[in-house]
Structure formats: C-alpha cells, structure tokens
Amino acid sequence: MANSEGMTLRLLLTAAVLTSSLAQAQTSVFNIPALPPRSSAAPTTPAPVTPAPSTPAPAASTLPMTNPVLRTEHSANLNGPGSLRVGQATTWTFTLSNLGEQPINLQHGACDVRFEVLDAAGKVVRANPTNTVCTMQLVMTDVAPGETMDVQDIRWDGRDSAGRALPAGEYTIRAVFSGAGVRIMAEEFPVTIEN
C-alpha cells in the first residue's frame, strides 16, 4: 500500500508541475500582439524618395577607436618636421596639453600611440600596422593642469603599408592615443614628401 501511495504522490506532483507549465505556456500566448485590422481602403503607393546629394565619405580609419574619449579638457598635437624624403625615417612627437583643472594621469603601454598616413585625396596609404611587436614597458604620463607633456614618438619613412616608396606630394598624418582606458586624437598633421 505504501508503494501505491508513493506512486500516487509522484503522479500528483508530476501533474502539478505539468499543469503549472501549461498554464504559463497558455498565458504567454495571450501576450502575442494582435495584427492590425484590415483596411477596406485601396492600397497606397509610397511617395518617391529623392536621394540626398552625395558627398564623398571620409576615408575609413585604420586607427583603434574603441576607448571612450578623454573627458578632461585637453588638446593633442604632433610636433616634428613638415617634410621628409622617402627612406629617411622621421620622428614626430605626440604631445598632450591639459586644458582642464584636474591632472591627467595615464598609465599606458609603449605602443599606445598609433598613426596612419593619408594622401591628398584622403585615402589611407599607410595604415596603422596591426602586426607590430611592442615591449611590455609601462609608461607613466602625468600632465598637470596648464602643462604640455610628450606622450610618445612615432616614426615614418615615406613608404606605404606594403613598404613601397610614395610619390612626392602632400600627405596627412593622423594619430591617436588609445590606452589607459581612454582615446585621445591629435590634430591632423600635414607633411610633404620631397624628391
């Protein structure tokens, strides 16, 4: 008898679980939105869309843009020569000026300043390399209010991403600091490749 009571109890518990599951399933059916009522009016044709005048899209950047922008009021620039010759490695310094009232304290890696080069048409001709080897060096950059500090140097030799010499002409260096949980864009820097 005890065995049949145990079996009855199991059946009752199973039935209760199934009933509660079915009740929840049925309730969810009523949460489906209704279809809009049918209209007896004739279907309308959408108005023709006039395309907006096209403007050339800016060149897609190869720079890292995932970190949020530094909130402290600041300016960032590249400082260095305005011209170079192909094959001559030239250095520019990424500087950060603190225009706010709080200090800017950055703990970052040795490769957190990245750059790309655009030609006169705005096409990226020297992309931000993704296969660089960086040291595991920790750099501390502390910029007090009203001060300007060097963050890192970048080097470029007038060659494109494939290592080919670029022709003489006007180019733009675009650089970004992306580390320490923030992003800082430097002002674009015009540079001339000379023969």
Image (spheres, rainbow, N blue to C red):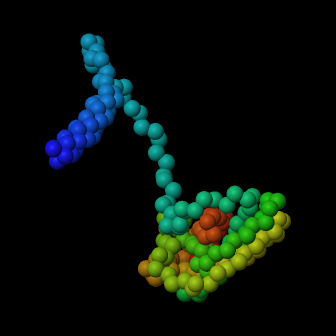
Question: As rendered, which of 22 and 160 lies closer to the eye?
Answer: 22
Q: Is 96 placed above or below 32 here?
A: below
Residue drawn 31% across and 21% down? Answer: 36
Q: Going by the image, does 150 lie left or right of 64?
A: right
Residue drawn 81% across and 69% down? Answer: 144
Tell me which corner region of the image, top left, top right, bottom left or bottom right, holds residue 181: bottom right
Tell me which corner region of the image, top left, top right, bottom left or bottom right, holds residue 150: bottom right
User: Which quadrant does the C terminus fall into?
Assistant: bottom right
> Is residue 161 at least partly visible in the picture?
yes
Relative image position of residue 51 (x, y in whole percent): 42, 37
Question: As rendered, which of 161 and 167 lies closer to the eye?
Answer: 161
Q: Is 38 placed above or below 26 here?
A: above
Residue drawn 73% across and 63% down? Answer: 75
Question: As rendered, which of 168 and 142 lies closer to the eye?
Answer: 142
> Is residue 18 at least partly visible in the picture?
no
User: Which quadrant does the N terminus fall into?
Assistant: top left
Residue drawn 25% across and 35% down? Answer: 19
Relative image position of residue 110 (x, y in whole percent): 61, 80
